[in-house]
Image (tube, rainbow, N blue to C red):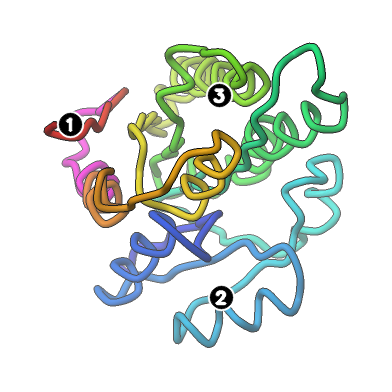
Amino acid sequence: MTRVHLVTGAGSGMGACLTRSLVDRGDEVWLVARSAERARELEQVYAGARTLVADLAEPESLAEQLTELPERLDSLLHIAGVVDLDRVEVQSVQQVRHQLDVNLLAPIELTRLCLPALRAGRGTVVVVNSGAGLNANADWTAYAASKFGVRAFADGLRAEESGNGVRVTTVYPSRTATPMQEKVHRQEGRDYDPDRFIQPETVAATILHVLDLPVDATLTEITVRPNS
């Protein structure tokens, strides 16, 4: 039986690497795109992939936007994310809310909508978190709050759905060479050298290992750190 996956964040970085691996090995892949134009771009990049148009920045609209979902899912892969560094004294409510919407509320709502398919497929939910989901540093408060929150969501979901055969894994990559990391360096005022960081292909390979784990075990949390 062909394995079926739903992916957010397939357009770049580790999401792009993982989606390419899934498509190349013949799995059925559904990709969430924020606009019809973006959906067409993804369909050109990943031949045979199916797209769903939904804006993760508007989690309250996901149920209305996602009227067609797979009947069975082997995995739901939460890889999309946003970051906007700032100090608490100057950050706006809009800055905080945007990160909470995309990084926390959208994964919660999308998972809720996909639970019937995940139960039918005894699937795996993978939440790509961050080192900021384990430790909060100055200027990272809003982003870290969203990542601490989605960590709690994953833990609670695991407890709720284990009896339904749904596995939940949180992956904590350290700094990874992605467009988001390049943006972080601009906000930090530092030069960006992608060779200094974990490569997105490495994180994608880690997630593939999670997806291919035999059904008798669950990898609840994985932290990916550079060797040096």
Q: Disc 1 designates what residue? A: 216
From the viewer's side, name the closer residue of 104 and 167: 104
Measured along the vertical axis of the image, is residue 156 above or below residue 115? above
The residue at the point 61 percent across, 72 percent down is 51
Q: Are marks 2 and 3 in contact (CB under 8 Å)?
A: no
Q: Which residue is mark 2?
A: 50
Q: Is residue 116 left or right of residue 86?
A: left
Which residue is found at the position 40% from the left and 24% from the top? 131
Could you tell me which secondary element the residue under label 1 belongs to? Answer: loop
Q: Secondary structure at mark 3?
A: helix
Label 1 CA crowd tier, 10 Å (few <14, some 14–19, many 20+): few
Secondary structure, mark 2, is strand
Q: Is 133 in front, or is 109?
A: 133
Q: Position of residue 67 (x, y in %)?
A: 77, 61
**Mark 2 or 3, nearer chain start:** 2
What is the number of the mark on residue 147? 3
Q: Which residues are magenta?
A: 207-220
Among the two numbered marks 1 and 3 on one chain, the one whose residue lies closer to the N terminus: 3
**Alpha carbon separation for disc pair 2 and 3:** 28 Å
| Amino acid type assigned to the residue bearing label 2 in the image | Arg
What is the spatial separation of the Cα atoms under label 1 and label 3, in whole angstroms? 28 Å
Is 4 magenta? The answer is no
As displayed, is residue 51 above or below residue 224? below
Q: Are marks 1 and 3 in contact (CB under 8 Å)?
A: no
